[in-house]
Image: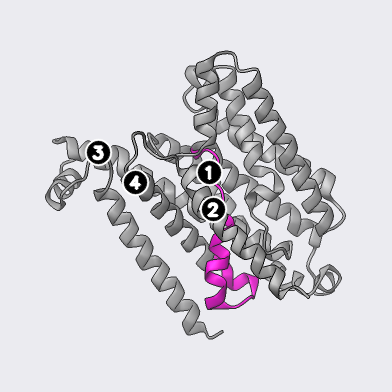
Amino acid sequence: MKRGGEFGLIAGSLAVLAVAFAASLFLGRVSLSPADLWAGVTAPRDSLAGLVVTELRIPRAVLAILVGASLGLSGAVLQGLLRNPLAEPGLLGVTNGAAVGAVVSIYFGLSHVFGLATPLLGMAGALMAGALTWGFGRGGTLTLILAGTAVSSLMAAGLALALNFAPSPYAAYEMNVWMLGSLAEKSWDHILLAAPFIVAGLALLATLGRAADALTLGEAQAESLGIEVDRTRILALLGVGLCVGAATSVTGAVGFIGLVAPHLVRPFVGHQPSRIFLPSTIMGAALLLLADIGTRVIPTNTELRLGVLTAILGAPFFFWLVMRLRRVAP
């Protein structure tokens, strides 16, 4: 694949992301005209439109970009390192681990005492799940995948247990709503909390391109090229735990973006893992921002949850991908 195709894809994805960002400021339950938007940006405290734009829609769009980028890059890294086209952040149990931490906060009422308790415990849960996956999965790619599946199932059981013993119907409802995933009612405080961890995780994952390229040849060949496979896996788990854990702890569970984004860019840049990293990051951000716009403009009595919409759109893609792999498998 020529470099021109890669640059064209990146430029196109950035253009889509820019258009989606602008659209996210206009569109919602209350649509704003260009004049209202301009007045809101230039004098945010003088009008209702200013409050809507600066305190609701801009933070929501920024958070969508951060979360989508973390999911897209995490999916690309995991698919390259594990040599598994179906790999995505939930495969290592990180997503469910973050959900368990957040649900614990809701279960014990900590979220009402301290507003940021949910995202903080969510990140702790994600890192704990990643540590469990590494502790039980050392020894090879297949072992790591099996350990991640086991940890993910264990975390899912913890979620079910919390719902089963919810202290009140309201707590059960709050946990259910949070697990559906949403960017609604997120503020600059959530961004300030999650962004440092997301950026740190993205920076860590971005350094694994050479290792991912070498691992396409196999673990033994990668080690002969100077790649420390165990260290690479630790860094991948830590990076995914930081960025996806922080993202999930703030927005709730949002699936399929990490699976879909790398496959959408791969036909344009080829199958070299390192060349997929940056386009997948941008594509993930654009996809999640577009999905969030969809939750606002689709006519429903209550706002459609982001995790529900991504599941509805992502599940058919997953089935298509499975059928495609069956056709090309030897």
**What secondary structure predominates along the stretch shown in magenta?**
helix
Q: Quadrant of residue 118?
A: top right
Asked if residue 269 is among those painted magenta in the image, a careful observer would answer: yes
- Say whether marks 4 and 3 touch (CB < 8 Å): no
Instruction: Measuring from the top left, give residue 249's x and y in whole percent.
Output: 55, 37
Which mark, residue 70? 2
- Mark 2 near mark 1, Cβ–Cβ under 8 Å? yes
| Magenta range | 251-277
Q: Which mark is residue 52?
A: 3
Q: Residue 298: which disc?
A: 4
Q: Residue at x 52, y 51 (%)?
A: 199
- The kind of residue tagged 2 is Ser
Q: Amino acid at mark 4?
A: Ile
Magenta residue check for 139? no
Q: Earlier in the sequence, mark 1 or mark 3?
A: 3
Q: Residues within 10 Å of mark 3 (few under 14, many from 20)?
A: some
Residue 167 versus residue 72: which sits nearer the camera?
167
The tag earlier along the polypeptide, 2 or 4, is: 2
For disc 1, the marked residue is: 247
